[in-house]
Image (cartoon, rainbow, N blue to C red):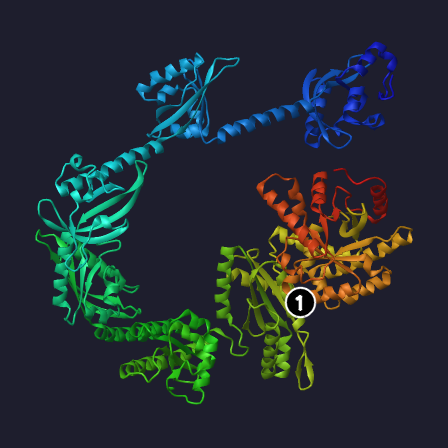
């Protein structure tokens, strides 16, 4: 027997020496288990494969070696085998190697309980891990090659040589065959997709391949399933192997190339058919080509003039206005011009000639391309247009001549504009000709009127209508348009004549009366002042588009430019300075003289007129391009405008007074019950859409009736004003504080990211009452009772939430006064349980049922336990240990968290020194601190006192705060943290990534460490895209913390995989069940010593 053989309660005398030697020598592993599945014997192969010391396997349960994911199934398998449900079964299982890795075994399990000398279960088999790895590698190579074929841009097909059946096709081939997937082609003959006359060719080529003949590529026509015929150039290769011979065909879709060649031939054909004469000469001037139109124009047979000099055809003279004789051969290529052209039949036409160099393979030394276009008809039309222009050039109406085609996109084009049209529109004549009529249209041009105009032009009918045009500088003008079609000798409409008459003055007068009536109607309808002012600015813009307008009344302002609105405050201040000493219309102000207006010059304005309005809070400013006094027509318009503005101002002030009286409490100035109800409804509607929390805090002053009764109502009223001001200083900008009546107030807190903010706000309201009201040298101080209801927890409508907040307030008044309570419905079992648990928790504090557990934190740098976190537990007499998640939230909703937190702090510091006095080295204690603790003014002095009484040095204490402490009063929280650090205490940010401040406060707070929430750690073991993002975010958080000089602690580490991942990311300290569970005080140091004397959990 060798030293590596393991045996327990096994009679070696019962085993023959030959049999045992065989077991030790064979490569197959042998394991014998007792009926309770403990290992009784393993052979040398098993020990060698798993690298365990023999003693490590003695009497060990077999399932301890099995992977956790399979241990239950293996245990069930062995149990069924033990009871004889089957005698022999195969089993594949992962067993743990001594180095922590996993090996895969293929085992055969047999029940040999009746066998004398064995009396147990025999497991035999082999390590198949290398076999599986090799199989995986083989499959990886196969996938790689397969992907190369799948991604190839060319078509690749494998088909049987004898019958042409497709055995494989890549995606590129599938696209050529017009199918969605290659699988649709498998087991189908190639001939199914070929033209019938190409079948024989394919079989001939395949026979040639069988005979070993090399073949050039062949062009086939594939009739694809997407109803497209594709030309494919295919090359085939014979594949011979163990099976039937096959053909590997690869090719490219050359359909586009063939189509391009076809188009080239078509272009040559078209060139011969175009209506322009095209002549090509060589370098010597001999004709080498002329198209059909050239042959027609010159009346010659192309064959007769080839290789003849150009002068045989080309006889040109200069136009009458030209004074230089022209010879085409004397001009270098690149010439353009118009000429008189004398044809062989004696006719003379006007032609447009272009001469360009030509380079072609068949013209060794280059040649010349001559294009001749007959423009005689066009010239005649131009002459007629000049005659028409002479007729209409002196008329006072603006005249435009338009092309009949194209009518749309972007026609109709302007072919003529007279001088009157230039005066009307501001465009020079040459700026209009060739442009679309649409150049005169603008954003306010009526779409329906334009559609009527286009329809009449489309139907070639005359029409008359009014249209809004825009001048070259963007000024709108109204015109009376009369449009008539012009036809040619064949009755075809070629042009339109458009006559325009300026009717802007009449239209503006009508608009002014209409807009004035609309503004008066808006005032009678009690429309918002901004709506009325906006309508007034629209009136001014319509009357004088080139003005920039700013108008302000009682804090409401609007303008005709976004820039003016952006500068509303500066504009208003400057306007008031200039009106302060006049209180009358000012003379025109030159922007160039008053430098503080200079930035407005970008709008093209040069001056400003100012008017005061009724009262002291109104002004009208008009910025313009005039520097002298306005003309009478502008003064008349401004009198109408200022009258309207004064009327608007009076109406606005009256509405504001009525609005305030209806919605605000006259004593305190706070929103009254009516306005509170409106804002609650708005907050609830927003909360339903965005899934936010809303809190209502119902506040009632304790003992206010006695103040009224003893000091009188005037003193009571002044005290209520004092209270409302104190309360108002405590709320957030988005909150609404209102007075319900009497001594009752209500605080509406919308958009709460954390429901605990309602508790903080309630405490601040209670603290605000600590400031006394001084009456005749006497301090008057009252307390308050506050009831809190939350949406959607305590109700989904305003009536229910108000009722529940009021109910909670009355319970608070009955329960303790000067405090606050959340609404708890008595008929709710959960609410009743929580209330009972709160009462029991109060008793537990009194009866000292709370205990502190400690969980070690492992430092990856020193490989030692760096610190322990103190965690409170409740030892309930009936229920045993109650986890903190069940009772800490209840404590945080009341004032119990302050008392519990102080007790944990004292107990943990005392225990740390008790360990030290027992001979152990000092160990840093990490303790959680709630927001309510930290924000208490006396908290810093309380911590200092505990450190002094316990004797614990401050640098051995670490306080963990959550991001939530920064939500209510970040400045005060930061000040408290600074004072704690001045004592020498370390500060860690707990549960990072789950709060609302996140990265924003890291640079503002003086921290020592950052503690990553365990949700990030749990995500490491999961498999999803979201987890990949979580890992990236986790790595970014660690890098950010290190860049800020912070240590990083990861909590909730439970698996070796999590530990390895966090080490690779650079995490500093780990905490979790992988190292130790939370422990009572007497088990802490024995556990730490085991961790430090042994080794950290394996990767």
The residue lying furthest to the bottom in this view is 581
Q: Which residue is found at the position 17% from the left and 56% from the top?
A: 457
> Quick check: 220 above or below 879?
above
Q: Which residue is found at the position 42% from the left and 83% from the top?
A: 593
The residue lying toward the viewer, choosing from 709 and 1094, is: 1094
Q: Residue 451 in the image: state x and y as whole percent.
A: 22, 58
Instruction: Name the quadrant of the C terminus.
Output: top right
Image quadrant in which you'd find residue 450:
bottom left
Image quadrant in which you'd find residue 209:
top left
The residue lying toward the viewer, choosing from 760 and 1052, is: 1052
Q: Residue 941 in the image: state x and y as whole percent.
A: 78, 67
Q: Which residue is found at the position 78% from the left and 27% from the top?
A: 61
The residue lying toward the viewer, choosing from 51 and 461, is: 461
Q: Residue 615 in the image: state x and y as whole percent.
A: 41, 85
**Residue 819 appears anywhere in the view:** no
Image quadrant in which you'd find residue 602:
bottom left
Q: Which residue is found at the position 84% from the left and 60% from the top?
A: 953
> Quick check: 896 above or below 368?
below
Say which residue label 1 marks.
Answer: 971
């Amino acid at each position: 027997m060798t030293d590596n053989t393991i045996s327990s309660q096994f009679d070696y005398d019962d085993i023959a020496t030959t049999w045992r030697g065989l077991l030790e020598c064979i490569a197959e592993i042998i394991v014998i288990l007792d009926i309770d599945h403990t290992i009784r014997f393993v052979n040398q192969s098993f020990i060698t494969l798993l690298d365990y010391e023999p003693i490590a396997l003695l009497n060990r349960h077999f399932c301890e070696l099995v992977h956790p994911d399979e241990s239950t199934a293996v245990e069930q398998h062995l149990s069924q085998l033990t009871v004889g449900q089957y005698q022999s079964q195969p089993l594949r299982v992962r067993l743990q190697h001594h180095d922590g890795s996993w090996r895969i075994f293929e085992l055969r399990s047999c029940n040999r309980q009746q066998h004398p000398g064995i009396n147990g279960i025999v497991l035999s088999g082999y390590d198949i891990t290398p076999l599986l790895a090799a199989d995986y590698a083989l499959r990886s190579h196969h996938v790689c090659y397969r992907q190369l074929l799948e991604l190839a841009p060319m078509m690749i097909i494998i088909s049987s040589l004898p019958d042409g059946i497709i055995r494989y096709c890549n995606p590129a081939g599938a696209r050529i065959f017009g199918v969605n997937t290659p699988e649709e082609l498998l087991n189908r003959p190639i001939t199914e997709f070929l033209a019938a006359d190409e079948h024989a060719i394919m079989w001939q080529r395949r026979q040639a391949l069988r005979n070993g003949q090399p073949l050039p590529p062949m062009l086939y026509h594939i009739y694809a399933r997407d109803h497209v015929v594709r030309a494919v150039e295919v090359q085939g290769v014979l594949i011979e192997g163990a099976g039937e011979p096959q053909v590997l065909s690869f090719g490219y879709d050359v359909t586009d190339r063939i189509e391009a060649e076809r188009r080239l031939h078509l272009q040559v054909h078209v060139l011969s058919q175009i209506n322009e004469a095209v002549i090509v000469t060589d370098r010597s001037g001999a004709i080498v080509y002329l198209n059909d139109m050239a042959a027609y124009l010159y009346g010659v047979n192309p064959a007769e003039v080839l290789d003849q000099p150009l002068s045989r055809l080309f006889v040109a003279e200069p136009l009458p206005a030209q004074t230089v004789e022209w010879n085409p051969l004397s001009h270098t290529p690149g010439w353009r011009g118009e000429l008189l052209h004398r044809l062989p039949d004696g006719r003379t036409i006007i032609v447009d000639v272009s001469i360009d160099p030509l380079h072609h393979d068949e013209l060794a030394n280059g040649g010349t391309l001559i294009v001749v276009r007959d423009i005689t008809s066009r010239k005649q039309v131009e002459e007629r247009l000049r005659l028409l222009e002479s007729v209409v050039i002196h008329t006072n109406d603006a005249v435009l001549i338009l092309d009949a085609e194209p009518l749309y996109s972007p026609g109709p084009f302007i072919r003529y504009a007279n001088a009157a049209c230039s005066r009307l529109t501001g465009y020079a004549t040459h700026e209009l000709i060739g442009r679309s009529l649409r150049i005169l249209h603008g954003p306010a041009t009526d779409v329906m009127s334009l559609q009527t105009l286009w329809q009449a032009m489309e139907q070639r009918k005359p029409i008359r209508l009014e249209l809004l045009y825009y001048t070259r500088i963007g000024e709108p003008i109204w015109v009376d348009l009369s449009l008539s079609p012009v036809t040619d000798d064949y009755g075809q409409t070629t042009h339109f004549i458009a006559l325009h008459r300026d009717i802007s003055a009449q239209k503006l007068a009508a608009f002014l009366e209409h807009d004035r009536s609309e503004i008066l109607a808006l005032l009678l309808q009690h429309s918002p002042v901004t709506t009325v002012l906006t309508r007034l600015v629209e009136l001014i813009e319509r009357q004088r588009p080139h003005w920039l307008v700013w108008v302000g009344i009682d804090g409401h302002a609007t303008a005709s430019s976004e820039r003016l609105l952006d500068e509303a405050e500066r504009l208003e201040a400057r306007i008031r300075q200039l009106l302060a000493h006049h209180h009358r219309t000012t003379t025109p102000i030159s922007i160039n003289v008053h430098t503080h207006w200079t930035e407005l010059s970008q709008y093209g304005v040069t001056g400003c007129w100012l008017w005061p309005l009724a009262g002291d809070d109104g002004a009208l400013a008009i910025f313009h391009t005039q520097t002298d006094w306005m003309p009478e027509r502008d003064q008349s318009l401004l009198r109408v405008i200022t009258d309207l503005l004064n009327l608007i101002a009076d109406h606005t002030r009256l509405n504001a007074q009525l609005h305030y009286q209806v919605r605000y409490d006259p004593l305190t100035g706070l929103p009254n019950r009516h306005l509170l109800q409106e804002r609650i409804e708005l907050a609830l509607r927003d909360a339903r859409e965005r899934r936010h929390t809303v809190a209502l805090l119902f506040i009632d002053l304790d003992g206010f009736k006695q103040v009224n009764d003893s000091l009188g109502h005037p003193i009571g009223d002044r005290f209520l004003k004092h209270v409302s001001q104190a309360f108002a200083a405590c709320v957030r900008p988005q909150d609404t504080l209102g007075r319900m009546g009497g001594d009752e107030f209500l605080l509406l807190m919308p958009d709460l990211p954390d429901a605990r903010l309602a508790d903080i706000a309630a405490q601040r309201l209670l603290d605000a009452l600590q400031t006394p009201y001084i009456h005749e040298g006497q301090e008057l101080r009252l307390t308050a009772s506050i009831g809190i209801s939350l949406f959607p927890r305590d109700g989904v409508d305003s009536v229910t939430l108000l009722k529940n907040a009021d109910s909670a307030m009355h319970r608070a008044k009955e329960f303790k006064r000067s405090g606050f309570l959340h609404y708890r419905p008595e008929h709710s079992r959960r609410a009743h349980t929580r209330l009972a648990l709160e009462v029991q928790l109060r008793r537990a504090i009194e009866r000292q049922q709370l205990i502190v557990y400690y969980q070690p934190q492992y430092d990856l740098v020193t490989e030692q336990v760096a610190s322990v976190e103190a965690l409170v537990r409740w030892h309930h007499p009936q229920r045993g240990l109650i986890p903190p998640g069940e009772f800490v939230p209840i404590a945080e909703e009341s004032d119990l968290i302050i008392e519990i937190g102080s007790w944990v702090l004292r107990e943990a510091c005392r225990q740390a020194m008790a360990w030290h006095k027992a001979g152990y080295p000092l160990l840093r204690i990490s303790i959680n601190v709630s927001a309510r603790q930290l924000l208490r003014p006396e908290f810093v002095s309380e911590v200092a006192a505990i450190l002094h009484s316990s004797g614990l040095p401050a640098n051995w204490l670490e306080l963990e705060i959550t991001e939530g402490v920064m939500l209510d009063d970040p400045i005060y929280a930061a000040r408290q943290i600074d004072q704690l650090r001045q004592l020498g205490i370390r500060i860690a940010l707990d549960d990072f990534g789950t709060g609302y401040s996140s990265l924003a406060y890291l640079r503002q707070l003086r921290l020592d460490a950052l503690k990553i929430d365990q949700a990030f750690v749990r995500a490491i073991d999961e498999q999803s895209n979201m987890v990949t993002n979580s890992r990236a975010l986790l790595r970014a958080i660690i890098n950010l913390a290190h860049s800020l000089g912070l240590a990083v602690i990861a909590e909730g580490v439970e698996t070796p995989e999590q530990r390895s991942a966090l080490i690779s990311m650079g995490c500093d300290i780990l905490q979790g069940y992988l190292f130790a569970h939370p422990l009572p005080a007497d088990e802490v140091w024995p556990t730490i010593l085991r961790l430090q004397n042994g080794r950290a959990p394996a990767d």
